[in-house]
Image: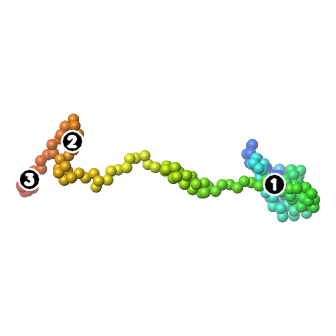
Amino acid sequence: MAVKIRLKRLGKIRSPHYRIVVMDSRTKRDGRAIEEIGIYHPKNDPSVIRVDSERAQHWLGVGAQPTEAVVALFKRTGDWQQFTGDHSIPSGVDPQPSKPDKLARYNAAVLEAEAAGEAISRPKRTPKKSVAADEPSSTAAAQPAVAEGEPVAEAPASPPAADQTENEA
């Protein structure tokens, strides 16, 4: 059986993602693989290339034939130089920038907002007045405050307590 190391295409129409796979040369491009030994995302900046070097060396050692594209990827990761024994060609894969910590970014934004004197979410309501601070003196409490121009409504007089007992009997 002829074994090849080639790329298996995944992803959407203009967003390809590849897996570096070991498969029989007669299978379809995206068919069943014997083993997946790496990934390649060309659209990222810089491109993502991750290869399981130990497994790549194993398959190259037992006679698997890499395609031209895979040889180019192996040269960038240094696996091809390791297989051929040629150390004169420098290898190099640009490292991926580390993703910023979301929690650290959030905490920094909170500290910045507090330093600016603004809250992240503050209710738009006006604060309620406290009851103890607004209590008028006892003489003013007997007469309600009336604004100018408003008609004054008289409070109904409460019937004496004797009338209530007659109605109940």
Q: Is residue 33 left or right of residue 149?
A: right
Pointer 2 or 1: first along the chain: 1
Q: Position of residue 137 (x, y in %)?
A: 21, 52
Q: Amino acid at mark 3?
A: Pro
Q: Position of residue 73 (x, y in %)?
A: 84, 53
Q: Give the residue at mark 1.
A: 93
Q: Dot 2: what SS?
A: loop
Name the mark nearer the viewer: 2 or 1.
2
Q: Give the residue at mark 3.
A: 160
Q: Give the residue at mark 2.
A: 146
Q: Position of residue 149 (x, y in %)?
A: 21, 35
Answer few, some or many: residues within 10 Å of disc 2's Cα (few below 14, many 20 plus, some between 14 and 19). few
Answer few, some or many: residues within 10 Å of disc 1's Cα (few below 14, many 20 plus, some between 14 and 19). some
Look at the numbered discs 2 and 1 and tell me whether their residues touch, using CB distance below 8 Å.
no
Q: Position of residue 86 (x, y in %)?
A: 93, 59
Q: Amino acid at mark 1?
A: Val
Q: Amino acid at mark 2?
A: Val
Name the mark nearer the viewer: 2 or 3.
2
Q: Dot 1: what SS?
A: loop
**Residue extending furthest toward the top:** 149
Question: Residue drawn at (91%, 59%), measured in percent from left and top?
Answer: 87
Question: Residue drawn at (60%, 57%), measured in percent from left and top?
Answer: 103
